[in-house]
Image: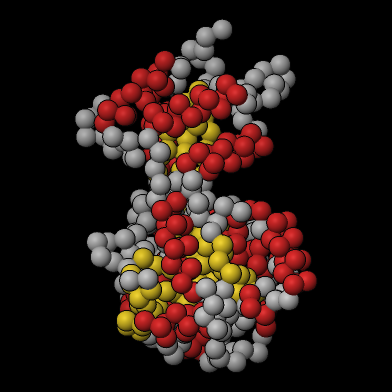
Amino acid sequence: MNDQHDHGALGDAEYAEFMELASEEGFDVEEVEGAIEEAGHGPLPVLAVVGRPNVGKSTLVNRIIGRREAVVEDKPGVTRDRVTYEAEWAGRRFKVVDTGGWEQDVLGIDASVAAQAEFAIEAADACLFVVDATVGATDTDEAVVKLLRRAGKPVVLAANKVDGQSGEADAAMLWSLGLGEPFPVSSLHGRGTGDLLDEVLKKLPEAPEQRFGNAVGGPRRIALIGRPNVGKSSLLNKVANEDRVVVNELAGTTRDPVDELIELGGVTWKFVDTAGIRKKVHLQEGADYYASLRTAAAVEKAEVAVILIDTTDNISVQDQRIITMAVESGRAIVIAYNKWDELDEERRYYLEREIETEMQQVAWAPRVNVSAKTGRHMEKLVPAIETALAGWETRVPTGRLNAFLGEIVAAHPHPIRGGKQPRILFGTQAGTKPPRFVLFASGFLEAGYRRFIERRLREEFGFEGTPIHISVRVREKRGRKK
């Protein structure tokens, strides 16, 4: 093995000790290295699928992810819970952001196409531009091309609805867009999608670009997320009005999230505003979809998600979806309960019961009770964000982790199933941001036992404000001692 081998989060001495342990337990060295590498990769590269309505984007997304999950309907503005999906091709995993289904005439062609595409493009590592080859390049397609050029991201051009040889000529006409070779595909029948995905993998980086500011001196990025009218803009305005350093408005005419550099607690932070659309929108369904696309894009660019909850309302399904999106994206998390000053004693009592039952999935996140309107407890926001970032970046040395795992296995062994008792043999932390662990075991570990391990990891090592990813590798039967 090459001495320059990348051991992920492990130092050389720690790595050698760890591999010796793996070998003693009957694990194949390559298998262990592969498991550590896979778990240590962290955020997946992001592919944005863009194009005007009804060119077959959602059908193509379903083809790429291998299941019918993205909503496919001719009706524009179809509401969806999710806009981000995970896909795999040729052994490589990546995220797909579907920008389909937005009514282009609601805000005028240029504004709406720019808005729906820009959110996704900004958070992406590469773009898949879908054009209907049977129609050819339209003015709207040309508008998207301008956006793609301005963004400077790698682009793959899909000429969709090419169902046979006769359509190849239509596809060839799309060279005129100036984006390179058009790949003829039929998202409906799957024709040509393999070649298309091979090209996509060439454009996607092995590991995604770090979109958040952890360069030396770079401000940490915070996404303010929450359902509409929960007080995101008010909160941003309140913190900005106190010690504002710079306000950098990004092309506010077509999409108006505002990235603001704000000084709080003696530190400069970059707040990514994800407040609802500030223009009149006639389709409420479209607006909801649009808001979720913007939230997904902001979270992809952030390190910390500050999730605002309106305490005067019941905690809703929409709140839960937004929390799930932030957790699944692996960001550090702070929960800010807004409008706290408007609560009477009775509402406060029932809210605490709701928090206990509805917010279990993020019981580990720092909590602040604030009022964006009056500025109450704003000073508590920065310590909470710093706590969450510290948890997000925490690393446990392998020796200490294995001593801890040994104690757990001795004190709380896995339940016996089918006459066998699986054991955790050893483990390592493969990465941070968020913390990712690989446990090597003698048999399958049940979900309940994994949750127990996560709970104990949190009790022992903190990890406040961060999701934890745990993957388990089971030892093959070969080389096993009776």
Q: Look at 21% across and 34% down and name the residue there.
A: 4
- The residue drawn where x is 67% and y is 18% is 420
Residue 439 visible in rendering? yes
Instruction: Indicate the position of residue 23 as horizontal and vertical percent values.
Output: 40, 18
In this rendering, would 125 be left or right of 286?
A: left
Name the quarter where the N terminus is drawn: top left
Residue 175: x and y in percent read: 36, 73
Residue farthest along the top direction in this orientation: 482
Question: Vertical placement of 414 versus 107: above or below?
Answer: above
Tell me if residue 88 can be seen: no
Q: Nearer the viewer, residue 437 or 65?
A: 437
User: Looking at this view, is 152 or 288 the one in front?
Assistant: 288
Measuring from the top left, give residue 107's x and y in whole percent: 55, 91
Work out whether 391 lies above or below 276: above
Seen from the viewer's position, the closer of residues 422 and 48 is: 422
Where residue 179 sits, quadrant-wise, is bottom left
